C-alpha cells in the first residue's frame, strides 16, 4: 500500500474510489462497515450499498446516485443526501462528497467519495424537534435565562400562566416576574447555579402581567455550553394555584366540620345542663332532654339537605310541629318563602319546639278540640324583619307561670341574641306569642375552627381549679352568640358567685356593655356569627381588661397578637370556665393560684 492508501485505511469515515466507468477500485474498512457488505473490486459500480433511497423514500438507482452524477458530469456533487440500506435491512442516512479525479491533461480518470453517516445528527435533530415540541406545547412555563438573570427564551406555557407574550419578556430581567419581597430568591438561585447545583421543586409565588399572584412549583437547572461552561439556567414553573385552592378548601371544610361537631356537642351539653336545672324529677329530665335533642336533630337534618347554607321557614315549622307526620288537622301554618341562615334557622327550630312541647302538654294541642295557627310575614320598615305569630285556640284555660321556665328563657335569650324579641300572652283561649327576628341583608356562616383544651401561656395546660369563694362578686362579661351556651356559662358563673354582665351576642352589644357597666373579666367567643372579634380583643387589651377565649376554634384562628391567650375549648367543663377566671382575676405573680403543667 502507498502512504496515501495507508492514510485512507486509518480514517474512521467511509472512503472509496472508482475508475472513469464507475467500477469500484478501492474502499477502506470504514466503507465496508458502513455498507454492511464488501463489494467486489472492479465489478461493483458507483456505490457499494446494497440499496439506495431518496429522502422521500423512493428508490434511488445506483446509476443515478451522486457518484454516478459526478463521473458523468465531471464535477463534484454536494448537498444531496440519501439513504443506504444494508443487507440486514437497516437504513443509514448519509451525505456523500463525490469528487472526480483527473490526470495531468485534465481527463477524468475516476473519482473519490467520502460518505458521512448522518444517523447521530438525524437522531439529534429528531430529539431536538421532539424536545422543542414538548417545550412549545407544555402547559408549564419553561423559561431560560443567562447568568445576568435576563430571559433568553419563553414558551407558550409561560404566556398562558403569566400573560406576557414572548416578545414582551425575552431580553427582560426575570425579576419582573418575582414579587419585590422575594427578590432575594433570585440571588440564592444564581449562587447555587454557579456551584453547579440543580434546584428541585420548591413552591413560591410569581406575579402575572395583570398583577395576580400565581402559586408555582419551580425547578431550576443549569445550562452549559459544549465546553461545559455554565451559561445560564432553565426554569420550569408549574401553576399550582388550583391545587393550593383545593388544599385550602379541604382544610377549611375539615375545620368547619370539626367546629360544627364541637359546637353541637357544646350545645347538647348546654341543653343537658339547663334541662337538669329546671327538671323536677329524673323522668321529667329525660323527657325534656330527649325532646330537645330530637328537635336539634331534626333541625340539623334539615340544614344538612342544604349543605348548612340555611333553611326555609316553612320547612322549619313543619318539621318541629308535625313531628314526622304528613299532616295534623289541628295545625295551620302559612307564610311567604323565607330562607334563614343556618344559626337563625337552628334557633327558630328550638323556639318552635319549646312552644310546641308546651302546647302538646298543657295547651291547645293537648285536647282534640284545640287548634294552632302559625303565620309569618316579612316587613321592611326599620329594616328587614320576620314577624311570626303563634296562636293557640280551643285548649284548656292557661295562666302565666309564677316564674319563667327554661323554655321561656330560651325563647327570650335566643331572640335577644339576634336583636329580636318575643311577646308571650296567656289568654283564656290559649297561648299567643309574637316573634320578631331581624333578617340581615347578608347571612354569613361562621368560620369555625377546631377547638382546643383550656390553654395558658406557652402551651401550658391549666389544671381544673377547686371551688373558690375568691370569684364571688367578680363581674364577668359573657360574649357568646349561641344563646344556649351563653345560658350555660351564665349558670356556671352564677353558681360560682360571679355577677354576670350581659350576655352579649354581638360586638355592638359587647362594646355597649363594656362602656356602660364595666367588668373584671371577659369570656369571649372567637367568632360571632362570622364576625371577627379582633377589634374587641384590641379594645380589651387597650383598657387592660383580662379576657379568655371560649370557642371551638384553634389558636390559629384567634386574633393576631392574642394567640397565647387563655383559651377554653368547646365543649367545656364547668371547672375549665372557673379555672380560666382564676387566671384572669388572679394573675400568677408570686403565689400560685392555678397549677400549670407542660402540655404533652
Image (tube, rainbow, N blue to C red):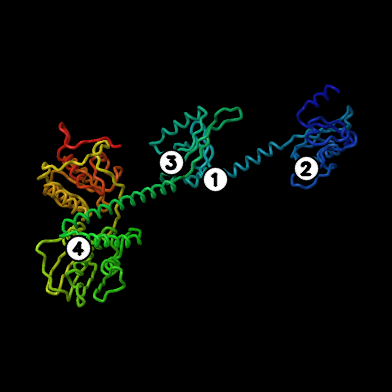
The mark nearer the N terminus, 2 or 1, is 2
Residue 345 in view, yes or no: no
Which of label 2 and label 4 is nearer to you? 2
Q: Position of residue 89 (x, y in %)?
A: 78, 42
For the point 12% across and 71% down, which residue is it? 398
The quadrant the C terminus occupies is top left
Q: Residues within 10 Å of mark 3 (few under 14, many from 20)?
A: many
How far is the residue under mark 2 from the one under mark 1? 37 Å
The mark nearer the N terminus, 2 or 4, is 2
Residue 476 in view, yes or no: yes
How far is the residue under mark 4 from the one under mark 3? 49 Å
For the point 20% across and 56% down, which residue is it? 417
How far is the residue under mark 3 from the one under mark 1? 18 Å
The mark nearer the N terminus, 4 or 3, is 3
The residue pinned by badge 3 equals: 206
Badge 4 element: loop
Q: Give me the disc on residue 89.
A: 2
The quadrant the N terminus occupies is top right
The residue pinned by badge 4 equals: 382
Q: Residues within 10 Å of mark 2 (few under 14, many from 20)?
A: few
Badge 2 element: loop
Amino acid at each position: 500500500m502507498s502512504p496515501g492508501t495507508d492514510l485512507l485505511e486509518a480514517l474512521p469515515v467511509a472512503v472509496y474510489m472508482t475508475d472513469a466507468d464507475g467500477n469500484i477500485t478501492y474502499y477502506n474498512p470504514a466503507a465496508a462497515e458502513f455498507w454492511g457488505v464488501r463489494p467486489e473490486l472492479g465489478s461493483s459500480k458507483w456505490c457499494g450499498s446494497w440499496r439506495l433511497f431518496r429522502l422521500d423514500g423512493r428508490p434511488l438507482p445506483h446509476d443515478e446516485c451522486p457518484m454516478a452524477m459526478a463521473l458523468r458530469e465531471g464535477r463534484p456533487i454536494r448537498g444531496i443526501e440519501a439513504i443506504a440500506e444494508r443487507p440486514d435491512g437497516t437504513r443509514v442516512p448519509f451525505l456523500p462528497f463525490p469528487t472526480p479525479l483527473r490526470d495531468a491533461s485534465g481527463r477524468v480518470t475516476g473519482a473519490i467519495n467520502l460518505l458521512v453517516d448522518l444517523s447521530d445528527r438525524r437522531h439529534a435533530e429528531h430529539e431536538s424537534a421532539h424536545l422543542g415540541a414538548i417545550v412549545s406545547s407544555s402547559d408549564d412555563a419553561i423559561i431560560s435565562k443567562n447568568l445576568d438573570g435576563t430571559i433568553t427564551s419563553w414558551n407558550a406555557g409561560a404566556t398562558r400562566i403569566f400573560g406576557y407574550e414572548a416578545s414582551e419578556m425575552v431580553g427582560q430581567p426575570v425579576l419582573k416576574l418575582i414579587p419585590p419581597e422575594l427578590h432575594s430568591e433570585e440571588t440564592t438561585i444564581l449562587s447555587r447555579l454557579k456551584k453547579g447545583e440543580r434546584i428541585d421543586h420548591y413552591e413560591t409565588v410569581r406575579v402575572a402581567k395583570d398583577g395576580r399572584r400565581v402559586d408555582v412549583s419551580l425547578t431550576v437547572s443549569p445550562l452549559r455550553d459544549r465546553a461545559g461552561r455554565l451559561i445560564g439556567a432553565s426554569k420550569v414553573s408549574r401553576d399550582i394555584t388550583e391545587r393550593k385552592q383545593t388544599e385550602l378548601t379541604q382544610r377549611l371544610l375539615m375545620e368547619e366540620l370539626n367546629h360544627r361537631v364541637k359546637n353541637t356537642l357544646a350545645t347538647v351539653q348546654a341543653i343537658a345542663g339547663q334541662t337538669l336545672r329546671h327538671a323536677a324529677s329524673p323522668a321529667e329530665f329525660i323527657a325534656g332532654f330527649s325532646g330537645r335533642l330530637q328537635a336539634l336533630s331534626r333541625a340539623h337534618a334539615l340544614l344538612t339537605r342544604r349543605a348548612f347554607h340555611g333553611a326555609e321557614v316553612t320547612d322549619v315549622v313543619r318539621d318541629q310541629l308535625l313531628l314526622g307526620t304528613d299532616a295534623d288537622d289541628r295545625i295551620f301554618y302559612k307564610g311567604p318563602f323565607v330562607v334563614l341562615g343556618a344559626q337563625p334557622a337552628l334557633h327558630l327550630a328550638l323556639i318552635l319546639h319549646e312552644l310546641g312541647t308546651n302546647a302538646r302538654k298543657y295547651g291547645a294541642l293537648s285536647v282534640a278540640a284545640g287548634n294552632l295557627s302559625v303565620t309569618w310575614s316579612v316587613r321592611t320598615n326599620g329594616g328587614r324583619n320576620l314577624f311570626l305569630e303563634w296562636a293557640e285556640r280551643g285548649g284548656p284555660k292557661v295562666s302565666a307561670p309564677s316564674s319563667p321556665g327554661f323554655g321561656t328563657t330560651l325563647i327570650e335569650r335566643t331572640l335577644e341574641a339576634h336583636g329580636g324579641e318575643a311577646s308571650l300572652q296567656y289568654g283564656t283561649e290559649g297561648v299567643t306569642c309574637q316573634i320578631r327576628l331581624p333578617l340581615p341583608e347578608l347571612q354569613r356562616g361562621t368560620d369555625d375552627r377546631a377547638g382546643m383544651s383550656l390553654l395558658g401561656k406557652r402551651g401550658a395546660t391549666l389544671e381544673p381549679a377547686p371551688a373558690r369563694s375568691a370569684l364571688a362578686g367578680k363581674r364577668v362579661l359573657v360574649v357568646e352568640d349561641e344563646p344556649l351556651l351563653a345560658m350555660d356559662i351564665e349558670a356556671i358563673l352564677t353558681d360560682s358567685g360571679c355577677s354576670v354582665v350581659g350576655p352579649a351576642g354581638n360586638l355592638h352589644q359587647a362594646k355597649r356593655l363594656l362602656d356602660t357597666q364595666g367588668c373584671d373579666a371577659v369570656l369571649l367567643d372567637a367568632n360571632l356569627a362570622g364576625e371577627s372579634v379582633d377589634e374587641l380583643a384590641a379594645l380589651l387589651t387597650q383598657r387592660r381588661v383580662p379576657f379568655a377565649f371560649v370557642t371551638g376554634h384553634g389558636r390559629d384562628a384567634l386574633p393576631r397578637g392574642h394567640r397565647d391567650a387563655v383559651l377554653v375549648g368547646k365543649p367545656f367543663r364547668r371547672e375549665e370556665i372557673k379555672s380560666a377566671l382564676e387566671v384572669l382575676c388572679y394573675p400568677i405573680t408570686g403565689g400560685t393560684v392555678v397549677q400549670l403543667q407542660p402540655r404533652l
